[in-house]
Amino acid sequence: MINSFKNYIELALNKNQLGKPSPSDFNHALAESCLKLYSGLFSDFRKMNFKRSRFQDTPNYGNEAGIIKQCLEWYITEISVENGLLPSDFFAINSLFGKYGEIEKVDMQTFNLLKRSNKMKPSECNAIYTLNSSLIKTFPEVLNLEIVYYRKLKMPKWTYRIISGIETFDPDKSDYQDLDIHPLMYHQLFIDTLGLLGLNIKEELAVQYVAQMKQETMQDSQ
Protein backbone atom coordinates (compact mmCIF):
# COMPACT_ATOMS: atom_id res chain seq x y z
CA MET A 1 0.00 0.00 0.00
CA ILE A 2 2.81 2.44 0.80
CA ASN A 3 4.08 2.39 -2.78
CA SER A 4 0.63 3.20 -4.20
CA PHE A 5 0.28 5.89 -1.55
CA LYS A 6 3.60 7.43 -2.61
CA ASN A 7 2.62 7.30 -6.29
CA TYR A 8 -0.59 9.23 -5.65
CA ILE A 9 1.21 11.72 -3.44
CA GLU A 10 3.59 12.40 -6.32
CA LEU A 11 0.69 12.59 -8.77
CA ALA A 12 -1.00 15.29 -6.70
CA LEU A 13 2.26 17.21 -6.31
CA ASN A 14 3.07 17.00 -10.03
CA LYS A 15 -0.39 18.28 -10.99
CA ASN A 16 0.39 21.35 -8.92
CA GLN A 17 3.94 21.67 -10.29
CA LEU A 18 5.59 21.03 -6.93
CA GLY A 19 7.95 18.32 -8.09
CA LYS A 20 8.79 14.91 -6.70
CA PRO A 21 9.88 14.66 -3.05
CA SER A 22 13.03 12.74 -2.18
CA PRO A 23 12.54 9.38 -0.45
CA SER A 24 13.78 10.85 2.85
CA ASP A 25 11.40 13.83 2.60
CA PHE A 26 8.49 11.52 1.79
CA ASN A 27 9.29 9.12 4.63
CA HIS A 28 9.71 11.96 7.10
CA ALA A 29 6.41 13.62 6.14
CA LEU A 30 4.56 10.29 6.14
CA ALA A 31 5.93 9.25 9.54
CA GLU A 32 5.09 12.62 11.10
CA SER A 33 1.55 12.47 9.68
CA CYS A 34 1.02 8.93 10.99
CA LEU A 35 2.17 9.90 14.47
CA LYS A 36 -0.14 12.91 14.48
CA LEU A 37 -3.14 10.82 13.43
CA TYR A 38 -2.39 8.04 15.91
CA SER A 39 -1.98 10.27 18.94
CA GLY A 40 -5.06 12.26 17.91
CA LEU A 41 -7.26 9.14 17.89
CA PHE A 42 -7.31 8.94 21.69
CA SER A 43 -8.29 12.56 22.29
CA ASP A 44 -10.81 12.48 19.42
CA PHE A 45 -12.40 9.34 20.88
CA ARG A 46 -12.88 11.05 24.25
CA LYS A 47 -14.47 14.07 22.57
CA MET A 48 -16.81 11.94 20.47
CA ASN A 49 -17.82 9.87 23.49
CA PHE A 50 -18.68 13.10 25.32
CA LYS A 51 -20.86 14.16 22.40
CA ARG A 52 -22.55 10.78 22.38
CA SER A 53 -23.27 11.02 26.11
CA ARG A 54 -25.10 14.28 25.38
CA PHE A 55 -26.99 12.69 22.44
CA GLN A 56 -25.18 14.96 19.96
CA ASP A 57 -24.00 12.21 17.63
CA THR A 58 -25.85 10.46 14.83
CA PRO A 59 -26.36 6.68 14.40
CA ASN A 60 -24.88 4.27 11.86
CA TYR A 61 -22.47 6.01 9.43
CA GLY A 62 -22.67 9.23 11.42
CA ASN A 63 -21.40 7.53 14.58
CA GLU A 64 -18.00 9.23 14.74
CA ALA A 65 -17.08 7.63 18.06
CA GLY A 66 -17.71 4.19 16.55
CA ILE A 67 -15.55 4.99 13.52
CA ILE A 68 -12.67 6.20 15.69
CA LYS A 69 -13.04 3.12 17.87
CA GLN A 70 -12.58 0.92 14.79
CA CYS A 71 -9.35 2.79 14.00
CA LEU A 72 -8.10 2.34 17.57
CA GLU A 73 -8.91 -1.37 17.54
CA TRP A 74 -6.40 -1.74 14.70
CA TYR A 75 -3.68 -1.43 17.35
CA ILE A 76 -5.14 -3.63 20.10
CA THR A 77 -3.02 -6.61 21.12
CA GLU A 78 -3.51 -9.26 23.81
CA ILE A 79 -0.64 -11.25 25.34
CA SER A 80 0.41 -12.99 28.54
CA VAL A 81 2.77 -11.01 30.76
CA GLU A 82 5.58 -12.46 32.83
CA ASN A 83 7.02 -10.78 35.93
CA GLY A 84 4.81 -7.74 35.36
CA LEU A 85 6.99 -6.47 32.51
CA LEU A 86 5.14 -4.42 29.91
CA PRO A 87 5.73 -5.53 26.30
CA SER A 88 8.29 -3.56 24.32
CA ASP A 89 5.66 -2.24 21.90
CA PHE A 90 3.30 -1.08 24.67
CA PHE A 91 1.68 2.32 24.09
CA ALA A 92 -1.45 2.49 26.30
CA ILE A 93 -3.38 0.02 28.38
CA ASN A 94 -6.88 -1.18 27.59
CA SER A 95 -7.52 -3.77 30.30
CA LEU A 96 -5.81 -6.35 32.50
CA PHE A 97 -7.03 -9.80 33.53
CA GLY A 98 -5.96 -12.28 36.18
CA LYS A 99 -7.21 -15.61 37.52
CA TYR A 100 -10.45 -14.13 38.86
CA GLY A 101 -11.29 -11.83 35.96
CA GLU A 102 -10.57 -8.19 35.15
CA ILE A 103 -8.34 -6.27 37.54
CA GLU A 104 -9.18 -2.67 38.40
CA LYS A 105 -6.70 0.06 37.52
CA VAL A 106 -5.92 2.78 40.07
CA ASP A 107 -3.31 5.54 40.17
CA MET A 108 -0.10 5.09 42.15
CA GLN A 109 -1.28 7.07 45.18
CA THR A 110 -4.51 5.08 45.50
CA PHE A 111 -2.58 1.84 44.97
CA ASN A 112 -0.23 2.61 47.85
CA LEU A 113 -3.07 3.72 50.14
CA LEU A 114 -5.17 0.61 49.55
CA LYS A 115 -2.13 -1.64 49.84
CA ARG A 116 -1.51 -0.32 53.35
CA SER A 117 -5.14 -0.13 54.43
CA ASN A 118 -6.38 -2.44 57.17
CA LYS A 119 -10.08 -2.11 56.32
CA MET A 120 -10.05 -1.68 52.52
CA LYS A 121 -7.13 -3.90 51.52
CA PRO A 122 -7.89 -5.59 48.14
CA SER A 123 -8.32 -9.36 48.02
CA GLU A 124 -7.29 -11.89 45.37
CA CYS A 125 -10.81 -11.77 43.95
CA ASN A 126 -10.79 -7.98 43.88
CA ALA A 127 -7.18 -7.13 43.03
CA ILE A 128 -5.93 -3.75 41.82
CA TYR A 129 -3.05 -2.67 39.61
CA THR A 130 -1.11 0.41 38.61
CA LEU A 131 1.54 1.17 36.01
CA ASN A 132 5.02 2.18 37.10
CA SER A 133 7.44 2.93 34.28
CA SER A 134 7.72 -0.37 32.38
CA LEU A 135 6.12 -2.47 35.11
CA ILE A 136 2.61 -3.61 36.03
CA LYS A 137 2.24 -3.64 39.82
CA THR A 138 -0.62 -5.70 41.24
CA PHE A 139 -1.92 -6.15 44.77
CA PRO A 140 -2.22 -8.78 45.95
CA GLU A 141 0.47 -10.09 43.60
CA VAL A 142 -1.15 -11.73 40.58
CA LEU A 143 0.69 -14.21 38.43
CA ASN A 144 -0.29 -15.18 34.88
CA LEU A 145 -1.54 -11.78 33.79
CA GLU A 146 -3.28 -11.22 30.46
CA ILE A 147 -2.88 -7.67 29.16
CA VAL A 148 -4.95 -6.05 26.45
CA TYR A 149 -3.16 -2.95 25.19
CA TYR A 150 -2.68 -0.51 22.35
CA ARG A 151 0.66 -1.19 20.70
CA LYS A 152 3.02 1.41 19.34
CA LEU A 153 2.64 2.59 15.78
CA LYS A 154 4.97 0.88 13.31
CA MET A 155 6.79 3.71 11.60
CA PRO A 156 6.25 3.54 7.82
CA LYS A 157 9.23 3.54 5.50
CA TRP A 158 9.31 3.42 1.70
CA THR A 159 12.50 1.60 0.72
CA TYR A 160 14.18 1.48 -2.66
CA ARG A 161 17.22 0.57 -4.72
CA ILE A 162 18.80 2.41 -7.63
CA ILE A 163 18.22 0.85 -11.04
CA SER A 164 19.63 2.71 -14.05
CA GLY A 165 19.81 5.85 -11.94
CA ILE A 166 16.15 5.59 -10.91
CA GLU A 167 14.86 5.08 -7.36
CA THR A 168 12.84 1.84 -7.62
CA PHE A 169 10.58 0.52 -4.87
CA ASP A 170 12.11 -2.45 -3.03
CA PRO A 171 9.97 -3.99 -0.24
CA ASP A 172 12.63 -6.64 0.42
CA LYS A 173 14.86 -4.21 2.29
CA SER A 174 15.27 -5.07 5.98
CA ASP A 175 13.96 -1.68 7.15
CA TYR A 176 10.86 -1.66 4.91
CA GLN A 177 7.57 -0.99 6.69
CA ASP A 178 4.15 -0.66 5.07
CA LEU A 179 1.44 1.71 6.28
CA ASP A 180 0.26 0.78 9.77
CA ILE A 181 -3.08 2.58 10.00
CA HIS A 182 -6.72 1.62 9.50
CA PRO A 183 -7.94 2.23 5.91
CA LEU A 184 -10.54 4.65 7.32
CA MET A 185 -7.64 7.02 8.05
CA TYR A 186 -6.07 6.98 4.59
CA HIS A 187 -7.75 10.14 3.30
CA GLN A 188 -6.69 12.22 6.32
CA LEU A 189 -3.18 10.80 6.07
CA PHE A 190 -3.13 11.82 2.42
CA ILE A 191 -4.15 15.39 3.31
CA ASP A 192 -1.65 15.72 6.17
CA THR A 193 1.27 14.26 4.22
CA LEU A 194 0.64 16.54 1.24
CA GLY A 195 0.40 19.50 3.62
CA LEU A 196 3.85 18.76 5.03
CA LEU A 197 5.18 18.47 1.48
CA GLY A 198 3.80 21.90 0.57
CA LEU A 199 0.36 21.21 -0.92
CA ASN A 200 -2.99 21.86 0.74
CA ILE A 201 -5.98 20.15 -0.87
CA LYS A 202 -9.66 19.81 -0.06
CA GLU A 203 -10.93 16.66 1.66
CA GLU A 204 -13.16 15.65 -1.26
CA LEU A 205 -10.11 15.58 -3.57
CA ALA A 206 -8.24 13.43 -1.07
CA VAL A 207 -11.16 10.99 -0.95
CA GLN A 208 -11.04 10.68 -4.77
CA TYR A 209 -7.29 10.02 -4.79
CA VAL A 210 -7.54 7.44 -2.00
CA ALA A 211 -10.47 5.66 -3.69
CA GLN A 212 -8.38 5.32 -6.86
CA MET A 213 -5.39 4.14 -4.83
CA LYS A 214 -7.43 1.44 -3.05
CA GLN A 215 -8.91 0.24 -6.33
CA GLU A 216 -5.46 0.02 -7.91
CA THR A 217 -4.09 -1.88 -4.91
CA MET A 218 -6.96 -4.37 -5.02
CA GLN A 219 -6.38 -4.99 -8.74
CA ASP A 220 -2.67 -5.56 -8.17
CA SER A 221 -3.37 -8.10 -5.42
CA GLN A 222 -5.68 -10.22 -7.59
Image (tube, helix red, strand yellow):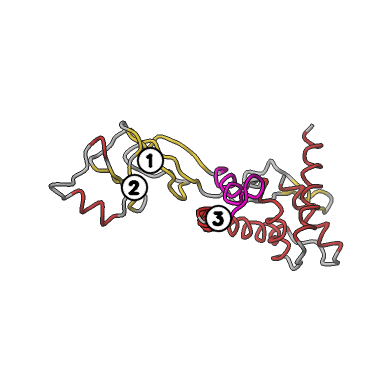
Q: Secondary structure at mark 1?
A: strand
At a point 29% along the width and 34% down the height, the residue shown is 143
> Is residue 58 covered in magenta?
yes
Tag 2 residue: 105
At a point 38% along the width and 40% down the height, the residue shown is 96
Q: CA distance from mark 3 to mark 1?
A: 24 Å
The answer to whether the residue labelled 3 contacts the one labelled 1, judged by CB atoms less than 8 Å apart, is: no
Q: Which residues are magenta?
A: 56-74
> Is residue 46 covered in magenta?
no
Q: Please indicate whether residue 185 sits to the left or right of residue 42 in the image.
A: right
**Quadrant where the N terminus lies?**
top right
At a point 36% along the width and 36% down the height, the residue shown is 97
Query: Which residue occupies the foreground of this view, 69 or 159?
Result: 69
Type of amino acid under label 2: Lys
Q: From the viewer's perspective, is residue 13 above or below residue 95?
A: below
Residue 125 coordinates in the image, percent (x, y): 26, 35
The answer to whether the residue labelled 2 contacts the one labelled 1, judged by CB atoms less than 8 Å apart, is: yes
Q: Is residue 39 visible?
A: no
Tag 1 residue: 96
Query: Which residue occupies the foreground of this view, 82 or 56?
Result: 56
Tag 3 residue: 48
Q: From the viewer's perspective, is residue 176 above or below residue 30?
A: above
